[in-house]
């Protein structure tokens, strides 16, 4: 049994080592000359603009569902007036950033993993190296930085759309003005509610981009590995999102109760 466990254990250690090397290559290439600005802008468009509709729709539905689920309990406790505050705090602190990151992990990490995996299988990456180009700087750095920048922006827009969805859902049964609703939402929030939630979205974005690029760059030969790379990128990125979120919650709790 022990002999059978050793190869898997070695592969796990090798994978950690390869990720460390891949991270160091990414970090070194950030500061090299000849940064591919045009590719970076293109990736921001592909990642940000093309993901906005999916993130916005999901956030809108989540805002409506939360209000509709919370309202019966809040009415029963006589705290119906606190619905905007409850939605704002829960959505800004936790639900909005995590939902956005999960959506991006499913869409972006799989896309990057499949794209780079197909390039690896068809030896396009090897051809770039032979021709003197820097595939790490062109393919990896631009994508990771673009995801790191776009996920926080998508999370911010998703928060606003989610609160608007809650406003519409609240008006299904109650009559509250747009001005009063958002005044209650904003009044319930403090800077400590917004800052940790916003900062952790940068880590979410980096994890999504890094995992997608790593899985694509290290896919094995064969067309089957492209699908495996995309699937593994989604699963690994989603896992990292929950790990980062758990760490962020602990740090935020320390800031609250200092």
Image: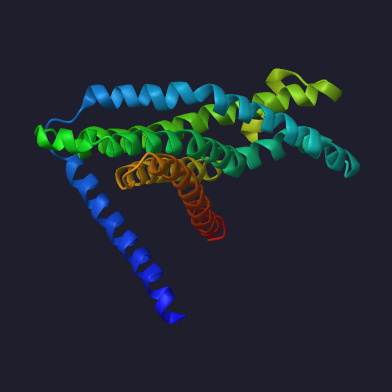
> Image point 53% across, 26% down: which residue?
157
Q: How many marks?
A: 0
> Image point 42% across, 33% down: which residue?
111
Is 130 placed above or below 18 here?
A: above
> Image point 34% across, 39% down: which residue?
117
Is 160 placed above or below 106 here?
A: above
Residue reaching furthest to the right: 76
Name the spot of residue 69 as percent of width and height, x first. 80, 38
Name the spot of residue 58 as percent of width and height, x first. 62, 29
Q: With 30 as the anchor, is 71 left or right in this view? A: right
Name the spot of residue 83 as percent of width and height, x first. 76, 35
Is 206 placed above or below 243 here?
A: above
Q: Nearer the viewer, residue 230 or 21?
A: 230
Name the spot of residue 7 as percent of width and height, x first. 37, 70
Residue 76 showing in the rendered view: yes
Residue 188 showing in the rendered view: no
């Amino acid at each position: 049994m022990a002999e059978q466990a050793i190869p898997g254990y070695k592969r796990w250690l090798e994978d950690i080592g390869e990720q460390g090397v891949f991270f160091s290559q990414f970090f070194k290439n950030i500061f090299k000359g000849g940064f591919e600005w045009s590719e970076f802008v293109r990736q921001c468009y592909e990642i940000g603009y093309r993901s906005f509709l999916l993130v916005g729709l999901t956030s809108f539905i989540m805002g409506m569902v939360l209000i509709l689920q919370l309202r019966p309990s809040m009415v029963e406790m006589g705290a119906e007036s606190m619905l905007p505050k409850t939605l704002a705090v829960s959505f800004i602190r936790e639900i909005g950033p995590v939902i956005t990151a999960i959506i991006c992990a499913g869409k972006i990490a799989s896309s990057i993993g499949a794209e780079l995996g197909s390039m690896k299988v068809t030896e396009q990456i090897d051809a770039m190296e032979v021709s003197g180009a820097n595939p790490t700087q062109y393919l990896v750095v631009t994508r990771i930085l673009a995801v790191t920048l776009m996920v926080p922006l998508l999370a911010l827009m998703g928060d606003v759309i989610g609160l608007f969805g809650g406003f519409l859902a609240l008006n299904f049964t109650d009559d509250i003005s747009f001005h009063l609703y958002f005044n209650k939402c904003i009044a319930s929030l403090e800077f400590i509610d917004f800052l940790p939630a916003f900062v952790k979205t940068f880590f979410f974005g980096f994890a999504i981009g890094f995992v997608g690029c790593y899985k694509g760059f290290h896919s094995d030969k064969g067309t089957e590995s492209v699908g495996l790379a995309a699937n593994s990128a989604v699963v690994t990125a989603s896992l990292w999102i929950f790990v980062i979120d758990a760490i962020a919650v602990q740090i935020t709790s320390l800031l609250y109760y200092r």
